[in-house]
Image (cartoon, rainbow, N blue to C red):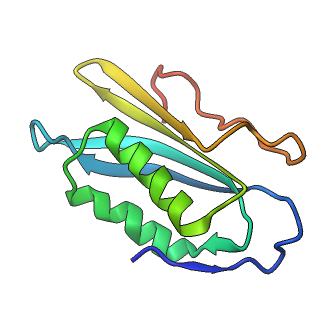
Amino acid sequence: MLERVPNPQPEARYAVRFTAPEFTSLCPMTGQPDFAHLVIDYVPQDWLVESKSLKLYLTSFRNHGAFHEDCTVAIGLRLRELLDPHWLRIGGYWYPRGGIPIDVFYQTGATPQDVWIPDQGVPPYRGRG
């Protein structure tokens, strides 16, 4: 389901950001929905992720039971496998369940110094939205 397209500017070093502020999965213990704000940044090499396929891939987690850590890291690993980017990171900012927000981060290596990588811009939990 997740698709890639050729990067039309493979010689350029630039960052791509996708934000999914309404990501949903299911708690594997209770079956209740869990909600997150995902921010995916990557520096492409030869491939870009096709945005509609990414939307459908992320939406498929609505019926997937997994812990926050598994969802966040699995998405990062799948994108790394698909794209082979110079660099990739994902931040999963999960809304509280039982009063505890969980934030999960995955990154493929050191942040590139030759590309502008903005802060993910998601504040620590305090009514985040």
Quick check: 18 above or below 127? below
Quick check: 115 above or below 80? above
Count how many numbered circles sit on residues in the image.
Answer: 0
Q: Quadrant of residue 45?
A: bottom right
Q: Residue at x 19, y 40 (%)?
A: 27
Q: Position of residue 8 (x, y in %)?
A: 79, 80
Q: In the image, is 99 to the left or to the right of 37?
A: left
Q: Position of residue 129 (x, y in %)?
A: 48, 36
Camera-nearest residue between 62 and 89: 89
Quick check: 45 above or below 50? above
Q: Position of residue 115 (x, y in %)?
A: 86, 48
Q: Residue at x 67, y 73 (%)?
A: 47
Q: Position of residue 100 (x, y in %)?
A: 32, 19
Q: Residue at x 40, y 71 (%)?
A: 56
Q: Quadrant of residue 97?
A: top left
Q: In the image, is 127 to the left or to the right of 42?
A: left
Camera-nearest residue between 2 and 108: 108
Q: Residue at x 86, y 40 (%)?
A: 113
Quick check: 58 above or below 11? above
Quadrant including the N terminus: bottom left
